[in-house]
Image (tube, rainbow, N blue to C red):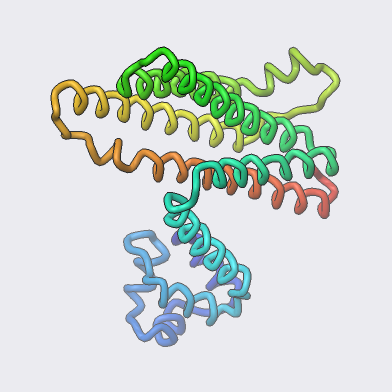
Amino acid sequence: MLDGNDLKSVRKNAGISQTDMAKKLDCDRRTIINYEQGVCEPKASQLFRWLSVCKIDLKPLASQLQHFKESIFVLFALPFISPEIVSAGYVGVIALCVLYGLFRKSVNITQMAIIFCVIYTFEYIITTLITSELKSLGASKYVIANSHFIFQICTSIIAAFSFKNRLKISQYLFKSMKATKTLFDNIAAWIYVYHTTILILTTIDYTIDYNYKMTYLSFIYESFVKLMYAAMVVTIWLLIAMIIRHEKELKNGNSQC
């Protein structure tokens, strides 16, 4: 989102005074000043008019908004799709990112995509095996569910640690690889912090509900799948953002991603 300084810079670069901008937006000069000082934010319609008046190409922004809408649609549609299909699609997209990283010789993208893929695949396989084994032993639904949650919590903590220390791990294991620390590592780590938080709250919620029939946190347990799918969408967008940035850096002859 553009802040006040951005709006001011765009206006000045277009050679438009605050008074002229106020006339074009059908408001007073004080409102323009408030926008540029960050006192308040313009509505979407006013923002588009501001950019249009300053002759800023709105096609990229419109494209981003369209992609955002499609992502939101996918997010709400995912719960109605078979978990197996979602899992296969998720791993498939990440695998494509791995291939891209290898093809474009991007160590960072390759490593991060591999970590995402390995963590998810490992978690999926082990939880399936846990379910099968516990069912064969006649374990209760409560034991099976909590075994899943506890294992996933441990896996998420390991994943967060791995992304937070990816550079050190990479330097220790693959000294020849030129990996670099990026902002995306921190975002990836926070994705798994989010994972861990949701899993802990879900475990508490399920335990209280199962043992005491109290549903104070039931909205978390009931929304668990959607909350996890939201993290999957963010993960995919993170990798896509890395790829877009890498392509831009290749065009500029300065690739660090």
- Percent of width and height locating residue 57: 62, 75
- Percent of width and height locating residue 135: 42, 20
- Percent of width and height locating residue 214: 14, 30
Q: Tell me if residue 176 comes above or below residue 108 in the rendering.
A: above
Q: Number of labelled discs? A: 0
Say which residue appears at 50% left-offset and 43% top-offset: 83
Residue nearest the observer in this picture, 22 or 185: 185
The answer to which quarter of the image holds residue 255 is top right
Q: Tell me if residue 111 comes above or below residue 23 in the rendering.
A: above
- Percent of width and height locating residue 190: 49, 32
Please state if 82 lies on the left or on the right of 39 as rendered: right
Q: Tell me if residue 222 comes above or below residue 141 in the rendering.
A: below
Say which residue appears at 37% left-offset and 15% top-offset: 138
Q: Tell me if residue 80 comes above or below residue 174 in the rendering.
A: below
Residue nearest the observer in this picture, 88 or 160: 88
Please state if 59 lies on the left or on the right of 232 as rendered: right
Residue nearest the observer in this picture, 246 or 218: 218
Please state if 2 lies on the left or on the right of 57 as rendered: left
Question: Which quadrant is home to the C terminus?
Answer: top right
Say which residue appears at 24% left-offset and 22% top-offset: 207
